[in-house]
Image (cartoon, grey):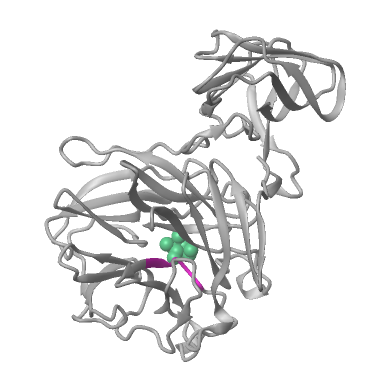
Amino acid sequence: MKKRIGLVLFLSLVVSYTLMAQNPIISGQFTADPTARVFDGKIYLYPSHDIPSPIERLEKWFCMADYHVFSSANMTDWTDHGVIVTQNEVPWVQPDSYSMWAPECVTRNGKYYFYFPSTPRDAADGKGFAVGVAIADKPYGPFTPLASPIEGVKGIDPCVFIDKDNQAYIYWCAGGKMFVAKLKDNMTELASEPSQIENLPQGFMEGPFVFERNGVYYFTFPWVQDKTETLAYATGSTPMGPFQFEGLIMDQWPSACWTNHHSILEYQKQWYLFYHHNDYSPEFDKNRSARIDSLFFNSDGTIQKVKPTLRGVGVTQATDKIQLDRYSDIGDGAKIDFVNAADKFEGWKTIFNKKNSWIQYNSVNFGKISPKLLKIKVMARDGGTIQVRTQHKEGPVIAEIKLPELKRSLLIESPVIKEIKGIRNLFVVSLNNQPLEVDWISFE
Ligand code: FUB
């Protein structure tokens, strides 16, 4: 999967990029702890910005100097609006602390309030966290940080929930425990003493995220049930609880990423889970990347467990690069690997290792006019044959490409032999035992 820079706007010093992706949704930089919100009909994504540490102290730990904001109207194409808050420009933040951890953003009375934890200048031993606020007139800034953090909030992972009666609540965590307090109307001061959220299961937890649906308040949180973080939830009938533990939204990672961190929202009548994994940094789990998958409720309001996918959400245009390595399903003999191990942001390729190995990629939009041409970026050291099918893996063949010996990855074109329109699932099958490596396919 490769970064597509479709639009580069130079507006004084602000640079916006359009990136196209499945899971992970943003490439070219790390994006952890994704808080997603709907503002003005678009999704805005406020993640932490993990970086490989420039200082020795944090070489093996979380390291974040600033925040970007991203937006999307289709959950496939994301615009990076650039840096909105940086540690060097917040008066109360210790400027070399690299501790701009999981943020939050909400809107009220036409203003956007961006909440972020960081280490204060006066922190004992240079450690500890407070939570600050930066305010803007637009969801993408410019944000002006307040001079001091919120008094009474010592901890990380702020989440703000505004109830139907307009009362705002702030949730955060400290030492693996969860806290809540009311916010004043100015959104920058506490209106009640913090109280600890009780009745949650034993074990480390952080990253609270609260939302309401059908009168039920969902208190959701990363929770270490066994070895690493699951995503779990409890429900209650008021924003401050009491909450009753319900179960898991996502299992712990089978591969090594200790954290998970999420947000949940409804967009165009579908619910989504935003979460993170260390896709672009498999050897170091403090460099994470945001993902999205669909989330469903049962009729009794409980949440169905979400299975993480690489395909993610959204429809891919047939004329875009279809990154098969972000597959919906994969058969025996096919696997994925990085295109360039030295620069993992270049993404992945699919390797077909034997006859009848296949990969499935769902929701490709062919529109109303059937394409004439299939383009495939492929390497076939000993030649081979590839078929693109639709409906199922033995379904109608829409293109068959006989590949000569290709010692490096090249762009090959082949006619589309069967009409294909609308939104379809694709199956790509290798007909030989010779190994083939496909970077992407596209239609014209
Ligand atoms: O990103 C730093 C920390 O990792 C967050 O604050 C936690 O929720 C965990 O994701």
Residue at the extreme bottom of the image, as rendered: 122
Q: Main secondary structure of the magenta part?
A: loop
Q: Look at the image and tell me in which quarter the N terminus lies.
A: top right
> Percent from the top left, x then y, of residue 267?
35, 46
Is 192 placed left or right of 418 in the picture? left
Is 43 placed left or right of 19 in the picture? left
Residue at the extreme front of the image, as rendered: 369
Q: Is residue 104 magenta?
A: yes
Is 384 placed left or right of 15 in the picture? right
* Boundaries of the magenta span: 100-105
The residue shown at (73%, 10%) is: 432
Residue 108 in which image quadrant: bottom left
> Percent from the top left, x then y, of residue 22?
54, 40
The residue shown at (64%, 21%) is: 371
User: Toward the viewer: 416 or 32?
Assistant: 416
Residue 86 in which image quadrant: bottom right
Residue 349 in which image quadrant: top right
> Percent from the top left, x then y, of residue 80?
57, 59
* Whether residue 54 is situated above or below residue 343 in the rendered picture: below
Q: Is residue 256 magenta?
A: no
> Percent from the top left, x then y, of residue 256?
53, 47
Q: Look at the image and tell me in which quarter the C terminus lies.
A: top right
Is 197 placed left or right of 309 in the picture? left
* Whether residue 69 is situated above or below residue 154 in the rendered picture: above
User: Toward the viewer: 342 or 422?
Assistant: 422
The residue shown at (34%, 51%) is: 264
